[in-house]
Image (cartoon, rainbow, N blue to C red):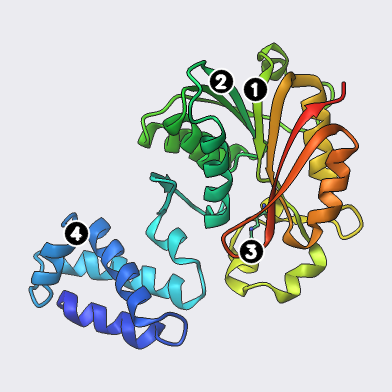
Amino acid sequence: MKSLAEIRNDFIKNLSSQYSSKEIDIIFYALAENFLHKDKITLKLGLDEMHEDSQIKSTLFQVALFHLINGMPYQYVIGYTEFYGCKIMVNPNVLIPRPETEELVDWISNDFENRNKELNIIDLCSGSGCIAIALAKKMKAKVSALEIDEKAVETAKKNADINKVNVNFVQADIFDSTGNNEIIVMDDFDILVSNPPYIREYEKEAMDARVVEHEPSKALFVPDNDPFIFYRGIIHFAQKKLKPNGRVYVEINQDLGEKTRELFLDYFNYVELKQDLSGNFRMIKAKGISL
Ligand code: GLN
């Protein structure tokens, strides 16, 4: 039977080539909190204790360690992550929310800070639901979200429950021009937001294996010869469902900033390209749609 201290040593020994010791501690204690239902301080103080049900628990740690050694992102192993103050459950059916996407939510939230009127918001390609949920929590708004993948929708609905917000999640393909009834009866929107797939297939080579091998490809990649496929779908959706004074906010491929801006300028009077905190052109705001 192993004490927690011994299990922690196994983590350090096996993960040091992939993670810093600080990261290993964050991962280890997040897992321990989950498995042992104790807070971090109690766990730290009781590192040398033997737990009554240690045998079962040490198997859980071993399985988690196995996945981590195999390069599974630690957020999937822990089962959740933080996004803009929300606890978001994640699994390999959904992309792990990125800090850049928090900046997109922050942009919207700041732009509408002093609005009292209830806004009607839709999030397209919503994945885990992180954007829709964060906006529903932060703003006075009625929020809907579309996502094509059934399992992702299931996860998103659970995330809305965890965060005690109301979001209308609809399983639908944004390219389905025959229209899903539920979408057709939805009102028009003040804000359309999306973090769609935007990485070109050929960019895969330069990416972290943890992302490429474990996160859902259909949430990440677009064909090399058609990188704007989702933005055209978003613009088409906006032409049908955005209010005349509504706005579109999207996350974009940092290497295609100017080209994406030009695409939006064909349909909107005002388009702003914004850098993220790392200085990459990462998001766009568009308003004044030409109908
Ligand atoms: N920014 C994410 C990444 O770097 C990709 C998100 C997306 O394709 N929408 O992996």
Q: Earlier in the sequence, mark 1 or mark 2?
A: 2
Q: Which residue is mark 2?
A: 119
Which quarter of the picture shows residue 166?
top left
Classify mark 1: residues with Cα within 10 Å, few (<14), some (14-19) or many (20+). Answer: some
Q: Which residue is mark 3?
A: 279
SS under mark 4: helix
The kind of residue on which mark 1 rests is Asp
Q: Which residue is mark 4?
A: 36
Give the mark toward the camera: 1 or 3. 3
Which of 243/153 is in front? 243
Question: From what the image shows, is residue 59 above or below residue 35?
Answer: below
Residue labelled 3 has its Cβ within 8 Å of some atom of ligand 1: no
- State the separation of the CA atoms marked 1 and 2: 6 Å
The kind of residue on which mark 4 rests is Leu
The kind of residue on which mark 3 rests is Gly
Which of 124/182 is in front? 124
- State the separation of the CA atoms marked 4 and 2: 42 Å
Q: Earlier in the sequence, mark 1 or mark 4?
A: 4
Residue labelled 1 has its Cβ within 8 Å of some atom of ligand 1: no
Which of 44/281 is in front? 281
Q: Position of residue 81 (x, y in %)?
A: 42, 54
Asked if one can make out residue 87 in the rendered structure from this viewpoint, the answer is yes
Q: Earlier in the sequence, mark 1 or mark 3?
A: 1
- Are the residues at dot 1 and dot 2 in contact (C-beta closer than 8 Å)? yes
Q: Position of residue 194 (x, y in %)?
A: 66, 40
Is the C terminus in the top left, top right, bottom left or bottom right quadrant? top right
